[in-house]
Amino acid sequence: MGSVNTQASSSKVNNYIASHNIKHNAIKSSVWKGFPHYKYRHGKSKPEGVVIHETGNPSSTIYNEIAYMKKNYRNAFVHTFVDDDHIINIASTKYLCWGVGYPGNARFVQFEQVEMHSKKAFAGEVENAAYYAAYILKKYHLKPNDACYDGKGTVWSHQAVAHYLGGSDHTDPVGYYKNRGKRYFHQSYTMNQFYHLVLTNYGNL
C-alpha cells in the first residue's frame, strides 16, 4: 500500500485544494416529497456507505439535473447533487434511492456530480463531494473504508458497485476523474486520491 499512499499524498488535485484553501459549501436541504420511501435492507436510517456518481452529461447544470430527476424518478434517482458551488440534498437519506440497481440501492446513500469545465471548478466540486461523503459517514456512524479495491467498505464508486455487487455496468466517476485530472492538472485523478480527500474532511468534522 505504500506506493498507493504516496500516489494519493502527491495528488495534484488534492494539493491544489489545500494550497488554494478551497472550502466546501454548506449542504442545502431541498428534499422533494415526491420520491418514494423504502427502507434500507437493515432499516430506516441505516445505510452502509456512500456511492459517488457523475452524470455523464457535459452540458447540464445542477438545477437541470435535479429537475430532470424529479420528472424521471421512476427510472432512477439519487439523494444529492454536487457541483463546485452547491451541495443540494433532494431525497431523504433516511431512505434508499435508485442509483445503482440491486443490491446496492438497499445499502448506500448516493450522490451525483455535475461535470465541471475548469480547473478551479473541478477542484471545488471534488472538495464538495469529499466533504459530503465524509458528512454522510459521520452522520450515520460509519467508519471510512475504501471499498474500491476489495468491494468491502463504506466509500464506493459506481464502478466498484457494478464490479463487486452487480446490478449495473456503469463505471463513473472513474473516467471523469481521470479526464479532468489529466486535462487540468496533468495527472489522472483516482478514487484512491479522492478517498484520501474524504479522510481529510472526515478528520475535520
Image (spheres, rainbow, N blue to C red):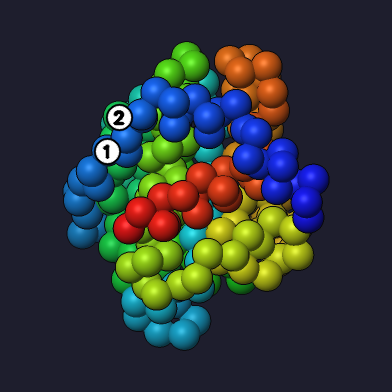
Instruction: Examine the rendered structure and indicate whether residue 180 appears above or below residue 161.
Output: above
Q: Is residue 69 visible?
A: no
At which x and y percent is residue 41? 49, 81
The quarter holding residue 188 reads top right
At which x and y percent is residue 152? 68, 70
Question: Residue at horizontal 51%, vertical 45%?
Answer: 197
Q: Is residue 110 left or right of residue 160?
A: left
Q: Quadrant of the C terminus?
A: bottom left
The quarter holding residue 40 reads bottom left
At which x and y percent is residue 39? 39, 78
Describe the element under mark 2 as helix, strand or loop. Answer: loop
Dot 1 or dot 2: first in sequence order is 1
Q: Amino acid at mark 2?
A: Asp
Question: Residue at horizontal 50%, vertical 54%?
Answer: 199
Name the outermost residue toward the bottom. 42
Question: Residue at horizontal 75%, vertical 47%?
Answer: 4
Describe the element under mark 1 as helix, strand or loop. Answer: loop
Number of disc labels:
2
Q: Which residue is mark 2?
A: 85
Instruction: Examine the rendered structure and indicate whether residue 82 appears above or below residue 196.
Output: above
Which of these two is toward me, 130 or 8?
8
Q: Which residue is mark 1?
A: 25
Which of these two is toward me, 96 or 129?
129
Which of these two is toward me, 74 or 8?
8
Point out which mark residue 10 bears: none
Label 1–label 2 contact, CB within 8 A? yes
As measured in the structure, the alpha-carbon distance from the residue carrying label 1 to the one carrying label 2 is 6 Å
